[in-house]
């Protein structure tokens, strides 16, 4: 358990997350050689049509889990969709990791999506390691980049490696933690590259032998200045999420990846304490417990299965374990859990706190659900977001209306979108955070459920879950505003606001009713 490092990569599209992920797996030995991956091509092709959408668009829609070993540690890398329209999935995935790696494009620094995702990490005081990628291209001055991270994110920064040159003149880095000179070989190959050359500090004459005089002088000058300007690495500050160590590299050239992995292995936290409504749960507790943070449908078209991604928060899990599903109070025997090893799924015989297992199911597990060995626990913090775009869903064939209703409830449970049924008229409305999600949904409803659908514009502004301590007051509100009320897939009441003014007015008129932007999954 103490060996586990469960983390995610946050970045803006194009910064190099996919490339870095591949390289991490390469160093971790999970994809030894291109040939080995190809040999299992048939299994890999067994992905759903939905993933075709993903390929066609060249964006990563689904999040998956990759497990690999490096040194003494076992890494669980939870991939997150990079596209802004799928950020909801990403936010939830971030509830299941213990730390994050923030990838920046050296020429661009902090970008919009980096900032958004960072804010989610900050809410959870998540420790973050920064990787400045693409140093082999024209990049911004490293001091300028460090300053931007510090200013924009209000985070202390400390360089873990220091770049020697940039762009065409990028030679490599000096590893400030292990005192090594690291040379970059420009190669896109599958080899991990050479390890660094140990030095006896920056005054080591070896540096003058190995680097051109100008580069050596600049390196010494830069590092002296960086040490003066930045605080030294402080494990506690990093673990509390107030300081980020910064690694420079070039993922495409396999450069800087080894040091980054070493950094995660050495400093990133092992599984952290998890919060449940009843109490905090420590990872080393004997009994197994955990929560579902993501549901993915139809990963394998041969079996119309759904996989619930389950983060083990405590205990030592063994296949066949019977677990209590707290929401329904039913017992579920986990006979066929899956572990995720790079592209392939393998049957999980055992797993530990920090690991993610996939639980095949037919819809009984939902996002936010807790499973335990008996104790009543409800893990908290897996949010559901109020949609920012709402559209009516209509089947092309009116005879399929009922079938469509069931399909939509299923998608709502899965967390793929918010689904609301209007109280008056019974129309179905779907809400998402980004327009692209509608296209993916229409495609899924057509290919997986065989119902061609249309999405029609609505004049709705937003949706808010409503809650009040006093049941009578809530009822008075919902009765009065019947025309604008709907319920979500769980039957929870939702207010559909036609415009901002409407929302502001009801909030003023009903001070005892809470209009919630997020709903914790129940
Ligand atoms: P993402 O997942 O964050 O969106 O980024 P991805 O890894 O797909 O990388 C985006 C582009 O940046 C790719 O180029 C990739 O090859 C390039 N890239 C990644 N790391 C580095 C690096 O260290 N140095 C340089 N110079 N480029 C890097 P592309 O042209 O979009 O695709 P491709 O045709 O190269 O595959």
Image (spheres, rainbow, N blue to C red):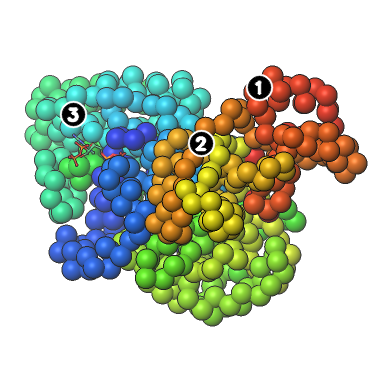
Left or right position of 267 against 260: right
Q: What residue do we see at 47% from left, 48% from top? A: 396
Q: Position of residue 261 (x, y in %)?
A: 33, 49
Q: Secondary structure at mark 1?
A: helix
Task: Find disc 2 in the rendering and name its residue.
Answer: 456
Q: Is residue 276 visible?
A: no
Q: Residues within 10 Å of mark 1 (few under 14, many from 20)?
A: few
Q: Is mark 3 within 8 Å of ligand 1?
A: yes
Indicate the quadrant where residue 229 lies: top left
Distance from Cα at disc 2 to Cα at disc 3: 45 Å
Left or right position of 412 against 3: right
Left or right position of 459 against 354: right
Give the quadrant of ligand 1: top left
Q: Position of residue 346 (x, y in %)?
A: 37, 71
Task: Find disc 3 in the rendering and name its residue.
Answer: 137
Indicate the quadrant where residue 178 lies: top left
Q: Residues within 10 Å of mark 2 (few under 14, many from 20)?
A: few
Which residue is nearer to you in this view: 287 or 361?
361
Q: Position of residue 98 (x, y in %)?
A: 51, 50
Q: Earlier in the sequence, mark 2 or mark 1?
A: 2
- The residue mark sitting in front, 2 or 1, is 2
- The residue mark sitting in front, 2 or 3, is 2
Task: Find disc 1 in the rendering and name its residue.
Answer: 500
Q: Are marks 2 and 1 in contact (CB under 8 Å)?
A: no
Q: Earlier in the sequence, mark 3 or mark 1?
A: 3
Q: What residue do we see at 44% from left, 67% from top? A: 304
Q: What residue do we see at 51% from left, 42% from top? A: 88
- The vertical placement of 212 against 368, above or below, is above
Which residue is nearer to you in this view: 371 or 296?
296
């Amino acid at each position: 358990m103490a060996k586990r490092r469960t983390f995610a990569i946050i970045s803006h599209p194009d910064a190099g997350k996919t490339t870095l992920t591949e390289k991490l797996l390469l160093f971790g030995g999970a994809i030894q050689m291109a040939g080995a991956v190809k040999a299992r091509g048939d299994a890999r092709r067994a992905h759903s049509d939905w993933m075709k959408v993903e390929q066609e668009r060249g964006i990563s829609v689904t999040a998956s889990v990759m497990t690999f070993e490096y040194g003494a540690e076992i890494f669980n890398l939870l991939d997150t969709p990079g596209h802004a329209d799928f950020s909801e999935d990403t936010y939830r995935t971030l509830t299941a990791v213990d730390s994050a790696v923030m990838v920046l494009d050296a020429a661009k620094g902090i970008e919009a999506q980096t900032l958004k995702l960072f804010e989610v990490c900050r809410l959870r005081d998540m420790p973050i390691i920064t990787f400045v990628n693409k140093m082999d291209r024209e990049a911004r001055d490293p001091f300028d980049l460090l300053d931007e991270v510090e200013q924009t994110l209000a985070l202390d920064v400390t360089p873990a490696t220091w770049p020697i040159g940039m762009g065409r003149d990028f030679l490599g880095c000096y590893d400030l933690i292990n005192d090594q000179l690291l040379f970059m070989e420009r190669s896109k190959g599958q080899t991990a590259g050479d390890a660094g050359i140990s030095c006896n500090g920056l005054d080591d004459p070896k540096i003058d032998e190995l680097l051109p005089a100008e580069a050596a002088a600049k390196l010494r000058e830069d590092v002296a200045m960086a040490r003066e300007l930045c605080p030294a690495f402080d494990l506690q500050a990093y673990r509390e999420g107030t300081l980020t160590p910064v690694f420079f590299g070039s993922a495409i050239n396999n450069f800087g990846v080894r040091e980054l992995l070493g950094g995660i292995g050495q400093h990133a936290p092992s599984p952290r304490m998890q919060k449940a409504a009843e109490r905090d749960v420590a990872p080393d507790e004997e009994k197994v417990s955990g929560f579902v943070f993501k549901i993915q449908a139809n990963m394998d078209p041969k079996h119309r299965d759904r996989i619930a991604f389950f983060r083990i928060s405590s205990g030592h899990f063994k296949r066949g374990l019977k677990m209590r599903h707290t929401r329904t109070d039913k017992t579920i025997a986990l006979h066929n859990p899956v572990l995720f090893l790079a592209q392939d799924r393998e049957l999980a015989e055992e797993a530990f706190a920090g690991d993610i297992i996939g639980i095949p199911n037919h819809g009984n597990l939902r996002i936010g659900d807790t499973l335990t060995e008996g104790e009543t626990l409800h893990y908290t913090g897996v949010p559901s977001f109020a949609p920012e775009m709402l559209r009516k869903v209509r089947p092309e064939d009116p005879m399929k209306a009922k079938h469509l209703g069931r399909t939509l409830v299923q998608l709502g449970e899965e967390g793929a979108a918010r689904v609301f049924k209007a109280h008056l008229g019974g129309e179905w409305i779907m809400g998402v955070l980004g327009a692209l999600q509608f296209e993916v949904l229409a495609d899924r409803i057509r290919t997986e459920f065989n119902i061609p659908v249309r999405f029609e514009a609505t004049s709705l502004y937003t949706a808010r879950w409503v809650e009040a301590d006093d049941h009578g007051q809530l009822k008075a509100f919902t009765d009065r505003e019947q025309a604008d009320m709907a319920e979500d897939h769980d039957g929870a009441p939702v207010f559909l606001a036609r415009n901002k003014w409407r929302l502001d007015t009801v909030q003023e008129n009903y001070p005892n009713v809470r209009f919630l932007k997020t709903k914790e999954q129940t």
